Image (cartoon, rainbow, N blue to C red):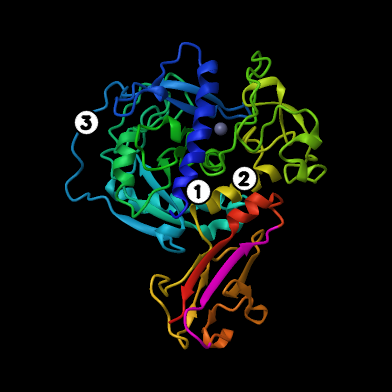
């Protein structure tokens, strides 16, 4: 992760804001997320999706509340967890690594887990901007083998299953809240070459899921977020798509709760999709004003969001960050997602190391991530910082071919995403990536 440090800083800032909001929100909540590093978590804040058009909400649930009669047994003999790439597009250092694991799948059901995972991922990656930027993701499937088929709480609260990851509906007595043992998830995720985001698919047709953001995971968690969803429900993929909005795009929830009233802070929210400013021309999304949005409305300022009803504004009437009845990010969300993709992934790689000088006749080949649709990669070559127009777009050059005849010159390949889904120059700069070789 070349930009991990910067991304981590941004995440920390975003988590801090979210936690502050949560403290104001969750009445009687155990301060699980705010515990000192190293202390065991007693409670976790998760996002809950009741379904049937009801808006999501955030709740705090106790940790370590196994289903009533769940038995703890060692993993079945010979059931060594296996990892395989489902879609590998590049090196883990230049990609967002998405790890998918199943719960409530027995050894005999691992094939079906793989099929379920593919179906769910295809649905998520059917949504923009995931669709266009799938080439910045590696996807890893981890086989977690459960003793029993299905998960606890399906169909009723009294059902207890012995499963690898402890997934359970009726978490904290909320039927559609599908919690999971995040420590076990972390253990399995560590089997993958890298894990930025984790999806847990519960073997169930019952609608449900949950989202754990970075600030809600145990201290030191290696990944940005965990989303759970049921495998056999055709709407549950939207939970994963929404959760990545938080963990990759650092987007705020655009929904509000009845009775929460006015936004309680005078500080402008850090997230790209909320503002305190009613004047559309003064907002951080002013570049998008008047744009016809994929969610169906025109970009402006719409009051309500970040759980509060007044004094806070979102860019569009609805979006996937407001309600799972919407299957689209608004343009502000799309731009933030693209910024998040490039904060952790690069579109440019080369098998020719930049750490050693290259000869004048040495062929330098580069690869561009296989992006489509909204993405518009432009590859430019430079000699000592001056562009070489005739080589634009060439995936393979030699210093000689670029007109270099002496020693010590620098050859640079730069890729920039010219996508029209980005209007902010700061985000455009994030999309740019360079490699430089010295000629010997
Ligand atoms: Zn959310």
Classify residue 357 as left or right of residue 133. Answer: left
Classify residue 433 as left or right of residue 45. Answer: right
User: Considering only order in the chain, which callout, 3 or 2, is on the residue closer to the N terminus?
Assistant: 3
Structural distance between the alpha carbons of marks 1 and 2: 23 Å
In-front residue for pair 286/125: 286
Q: Which mark is residue 120?
A: 1
Residue 78's x, y, as percent?
18, 51
- Around disc 2, counting alpha carbons within 10 Å, would you say few (fewer than 14), some (14 to 19), or many (20 or more)? many
Q: Tell me the element at label 1.
A: helix
Classify residue 275 as left or right of residue 193. Answer: right
Q: Is residue 408 magenta?
A: yes
Q: Residue furthest right?
A: 290
Q: Which mark is residue 3?
A: none
- Around disc 1, counting alpha carbons within 10 Å, would you say few (fewer than 14), some (14 to 19), or many (20 or more)? many
Would you identify the image quadrant in which residue 263 lies? top right
Structural distance between the alpha carbons of marks 2 and 3: 42 Å
| Location of mark 3 (residue) | 72
345 to 391, vertically: above or below: above
In-front residue for pair 218/35: 35
Residue 258 seen in the figure: yes
Q: Tell me the element at label 2.
A: helix
Residue depicted at 55% across the width and 62% down the height: 433
Image quadrant in which the C terminus is located: bottom left
Residue depicted at 67% across the width and 58% down the height: 374
Residue depicted at 59% across the width and 79% down the height: 394
User: Considering only order in the chain, which callout, 1 or 3, is on the residue closer to the N terminus?
Assistant: 3
User: Considering only order in the chain, which callout, 2 or 1, is on the residue closer to the N terminus?
Assistant: 1
| Location of mark 2 (residue) | 336
Residue 208's x, y, as percent?
49, 32
Range of magenta residues:
405-419
- Around disc 3, counting alpha carbons within 10 Å, would you say few (fewer than 14), some (14 to 19), or many (20 or more)? few
């Amino acid at each position: 992760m070349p930009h991990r440090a910067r991304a981590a800083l941004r995440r920390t800032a975003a988590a801090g804001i979210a936690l502050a909001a949560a403290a104001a929100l969750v009445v009687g909540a155990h301060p699980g997320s705010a515990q000192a590093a190293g202390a065991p978590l007693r409670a976790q804040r998760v996002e809950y999706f009741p379904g049937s058009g009801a808006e999501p909400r955030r709740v705090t649930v106790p940790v370590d509340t196994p289903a009533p009669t769940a038995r703890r047994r060692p993993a079945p003999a010979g059931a060594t967890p296996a990892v395989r790439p489902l879609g590998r597009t590049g090196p883990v250092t230049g990609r967002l690594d998405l790890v998918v694991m199943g719960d409530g799948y027995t050894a005999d059901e691992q094939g079906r887990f793989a099929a379920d995972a593919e179906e769910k991922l295809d649905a998520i990656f059917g949504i923009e901007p995931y669709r266009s930027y799938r080439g910045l993701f590696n996807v890893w499937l981890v086989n977690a083998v459960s003793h029993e088929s299905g998960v606890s709480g399906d169909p009723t609260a009294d059902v207890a299953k012995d499963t690898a990851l402890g997934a359970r509906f009726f978490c904290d007595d909320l039927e559609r809240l599908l919690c999971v043992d995040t420590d076990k998830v972390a253990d399995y995720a560590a089997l993958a070459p890298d894990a930025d985001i984790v999806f847990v698919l519960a073997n169930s047709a019952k609608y449900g899921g949950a989202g754990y953001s970075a600030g809600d995971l145990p201290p030191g968690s290696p990944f940005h977020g965990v989303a759970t969803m049921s495998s056999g429900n055709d709407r549950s993929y939207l939970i994963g798509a929404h959760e990545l909005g938080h963990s990759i795009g650092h987007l705020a929830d655009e929904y509000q709760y009845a009775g929460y009233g006015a936004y309680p802070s005078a500080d402008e929210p850090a997230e790209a999709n909320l503002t305190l400013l009613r004047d559309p021309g003064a907002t951080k999304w002013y570049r998008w004003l008047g744009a016809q949005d994929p969610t169906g409305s025109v970009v402006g300022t719409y009051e309500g969001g970040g759980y509060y009803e007044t004094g806070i504004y979102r860019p569009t009437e609805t979006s996937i960050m407001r309600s799972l009845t919407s299957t689209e990010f608004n343009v502000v969300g799309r731009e933030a997602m693209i910024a998040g993709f490039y904060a952790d992934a690069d579109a440019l790689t080369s098998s020719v190391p930049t750490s050693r000088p290259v000869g004048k006749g040495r062929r330098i080949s580069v690869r561009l991530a296989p992006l489509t649709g909204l993405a518009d990669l432009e590859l430019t070559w430079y000699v000592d910082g001056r562009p070489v127009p005739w080589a634009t777009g060439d995936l393979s050059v030699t210093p000689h071919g670029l007109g270099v005849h002496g020693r010590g010159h620098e050859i640079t390949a730069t890729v920039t995403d010219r996508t029209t889904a980005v209007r902010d120059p700061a985000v455009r700069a994030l999309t740019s990536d360079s490699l430089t070789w010295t000629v010997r």
